[in-house]
Image (spheres, rainbow, N blue to C red):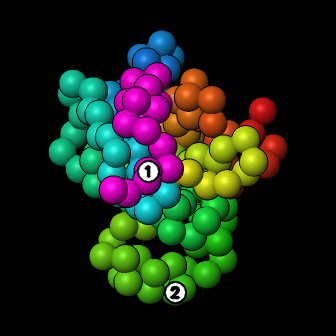
Amino acid sequence: MFKSSISLQQAVLIAEKSLERGRELGFEPLTVVVLDDGGQVKVILRDDGCSLLRPEIATGKAAGALNMGFGGRELARRAAKMPMFFTALNAMSDGRMVTVPGGVLMRDAQGVVVGAVGISGDVSENDEICAVAGIKAAGLVPDTGDPLSED
C-alpha cells in the first residue's frame, strides 16, 4: 500500500471550494486540478461551460509549481528572466510547465509541500484567488510564490 500526502476527501474539498469561490466572485467557468506530492492527479473538477484545454492548462500550472518547488508567481518571474531555461524545462516535462499565477503549492502546518493546485478558466490572478480559497478551506497553507499575498 502507498501513502498519499493528501486524502481524496481533502482534494475534493479543495476543488469544490475553489469552484465555489469562483462562482461567488462571478468568474468565468473554472477547471481545478489537485495533485498530490508525487505529482499524481487526485481530482479534476470542471465547471459547466469550460473550454476544451482547461484541464491541461490547470495541470500544467499545478505541475510547474510542484516540479520546481515554488508557486506560479515565482515561476512567472523566473521564466521572464530566463526564458530559454524555462523553454527547455517545458520541453523536458512534455509541456507540463505553465508558468503563470494559478499554480499554487499546498503546504502543511510545518511547511512541508503536500501537493499543488492548478486552476484555469479566468485570468490567472483570479484563478489563483480561487486556488488559495480552496487550499485554506482544507486547512492547508497556500504558497503562490509571492510571500506578500499569502495572508
Mark 1: secondary structure: loop
Q: Residues within 10 Å of mark 2 (few under 14, many from 20)?
A: few
Closest to the observer, 141 or 61? 141
Gap between marks 1 and 2 measured at Cα: 34 Å
Q: Is residue 143 left or right of residue 128?
A: right
Residue 65 appears anywhere in the view: yes
- Residue 109 on image: x %, y %: 73, 41
Q: Quadrant of the N terminus?
A: bottom left
What residue sits right under mark 2 in the picture? 84
Residue 4 bears which disc, if any?
Answer: 1
Span colored in magenta? 1-17
Residue at the (39%, 24%) spot, across then down:
16
Looking at the image, is 42 positioned above or below residue 88? above
Q: Is residue 143 left or right of residue 99?
A: right
Mark 2: secondary structure: helix
Residue at the (52%, 61%) spot, across then down:
66
Amino acid at dot 2: Met
Residue at the (44%, 26%) spot, across then down:
13
Quadrant position of residue 80: bottom right
Q: Is residue 41 left or right of residue 146?
A: left
Q: Quadrant of the C terminus?
A: top right
Q: Residue 12 magenta-drawn?
A: yes
Residue at the (59%, 46%) spot, across then down:
106
* Disc nearer the start of the sequence (1/2): 1
- Residue 32 on image: x %, y %: 37, 38
Viewer-side label of 1, 2: 1
Closest to the observer, 13 or 96? 13
Closest to the observer, 113 or 83? 113
Residue at the far front: name it.
1
Amino acid at dot 1: Ser
